[in-house]
Amino acid sequence: MLFFELTVQGLVQGSIYALIAVGLTLVYGLLRVLHVAHAGLFTLGGYIGVIVTNATGSLLLATLTAMVTVGFLGIIIYRLCYHPILDKPPFVALIASIGLFIAMEEIFRLMFGPYGLSYDAPPLMETVSIAGMNLKYAEVVVMAGTATLIGGLAFLAEKTRLGAAWRATVTDPEMAGSFGIDIIRVRYLNFFIGSALAAAAGVLVALLNNLVEPTMGSVASYKALAIIVLGGLGDVRGTLIASLVLGIIESFGTIYLGAILDRDAIAFAFLILVLMVRPRGMFAKA
Amino acid sequence: MEYQITLITIVSISVMAALSLNLITGFCGQISLGHAAFYGAGAYTSAMLTTTGIPFTASLVAAAGIAGFLGLIVGFASLRVRHDFLAITTMGVGFLFVGIIRQQDVLGGEMGIFGIPDPGFGKIGYMFFCLILAGITAAFSLYLKRTWMGYSFDAIADDEDTAKMIGIDVSRYKLAAFAMGTAIAGIAGGLYAHEVKYIGPDSFGFIESVTMLAIVVIGGIGSVPGVIVAAIALTMLPQWLQIIADYKLLLYGGLLFGFMRFSPGGLAALTRKLMSVRTANVEFEEVPGGRTPER
């Protein structure tokens, strides 16, 4: 029974990782930028979710508000921060992004206070019994929500004209441009979607922990980086699998390796191990 | 006077740590987001040894040895993974280091190591000791730049594949850069441990790694004088102005972002631009690894 429970816990955690990491890997696939500040948007999503829920009482409205607001903020970050430095060496954007992320965390601390916010009446805290396991509704919502959002993303990318333009730009920006696709708008779309997904993840994490705090993005951010590297940078399918695998490995590792490594170190031990064997990620073709 | 002595000691240690990262990231072009791990390895090694009664200077040698050995291992990783993958791997090494330290009771676990013995040089003596070591590191960096090894580092930083093609043993030089840089970081860590007399896992986390990288980048990646100036400025500013100490991270974040956004060559490039000794496009070439991304 412990086996199933650990697996489900791992899947819940893995779903959250997936929502964060997909946005990151989309940005990397398009621009070759490691967008560390993405986790700042995740944190902001959590804050907006809690504040709007407390004000209106509707979690759904809060999630949508968070996704749209943070999505637009993602576009602004691209336009003001990354767009001007894309022609510089890759580490420039990486370090700029780290700087931006640290500054964002501090701004959250100053705006919302250092101790974090909670839901006044935490929604979805009732438990439901599935196959002998007691799950919180929140955990079910996390898994279902992730599946819906990622499914929607897959539909958008595979079945619509917009998605075709997007995929074309990722594969070959110049060629796509010469076919009349507005590359800049594709980048805006990319940042909007990625950031909106991160915001949704922020709301869901706030739901699971019933807490948002200024630094909640830190660990998420570094782990999401590890995940997209594991998945093979820019590879969405690989990232999804890597997220779920890491979620499960962590949930088992905490039980069986907890004495030697803490939870966050397990992710990176796994990352380093995989990279030493497969330097371009788990699913890279040889 | 006591306060100024402590300040100079701390500043010399930061200069040394920043210069050690500059060897790896600045000279050889290998981005490291986990340098605090080696600084920490040195600090823990020397603190563990002196608390059991081994002389301070001997413990520093051991600190350099252990940190350099760990650095060599990570150097081997740099032979496998490159660019963004390397940045993330080194970041992982940093987290792994802290994660392991936290769980080891021998190393004090979460509590860290207290009551690290005094090196016995006196306050002023210790200040001079640190100053001299920082000076040696700076001189060594400047000397290294003019040696065959320094030129090879330059070539690797600029374009690894071409360097390999013209017969530079890229692997050996990368390993050398990692071993030297991390060994010096280890010594700096040992000095730090014996200055503040207390170390814990939180003293060597990701923020410390980023701070070191911030100093190197803000100073001007690869520029020895630039890095020294940035190390002095970024260590002293929060001490002088209390308001900055409260917003230290906001300042670091803002500076990192601002410099990358407006002057990726750091202070060194900015000074050159202001003196207008060189033209703007030469300044861009000074950034190691400078290339137009394929897109």
Image (spheres, helix red, strand yellow):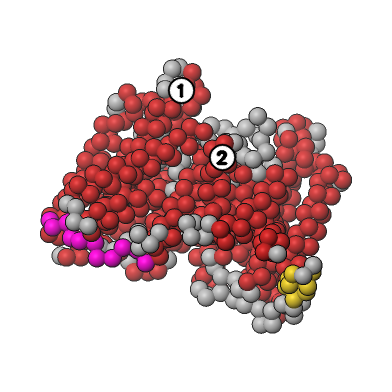
Chain letter belonging to callout 1: B
User: Residue B101, image x and y in percent?
Assistant: 41, 57
User: Residue B93, image x and y in percent?
Assistant: 46, 48
Image position of B164 with respect to B112: above or below: above
B284 left or right of A144 in image = left
User: Residue A175, image x and y in percent?
Assistant: 75, 31
What residue is at 77 percent from the left and 35 percent from the top? A176
Report crowding for label 2: few under 14, some 14 to 19, many 20 or more residues within 10 A (C-alpha): many
Farthest residue, direction front: A1
User: Residue B146, image x and y in percent?
Assistant: 29, 27
Can you see residue A163? yes
Image position of B210 with respect to B171: above or below: below
Q: Is residue B6 magenta?
A: no
Can you see residue A31? no
Which residue is the site of mark 2?
A275
Which residue is the site of mark 1?
B163
Farthest residue, direction bottom: A120
Chain letter belonging to callout 2: A
Report crowding for label 1: few under 14, some 14 to 19, many 20 or more residues within 10 A (C-alpha): some
Please identify the quarter of the rendering in which residue B292 is found. top right
What residue is at 77 percent from the left and 43 percent from the top? A166
Q: From which residue to which does the magenta span run?
A: B111-121
The residue nearer to you, when weighing B67 against A38, is B67
- Dot 1: what SS? helix
What residue is at 47 percent from the left and 56 percent from the top? A260
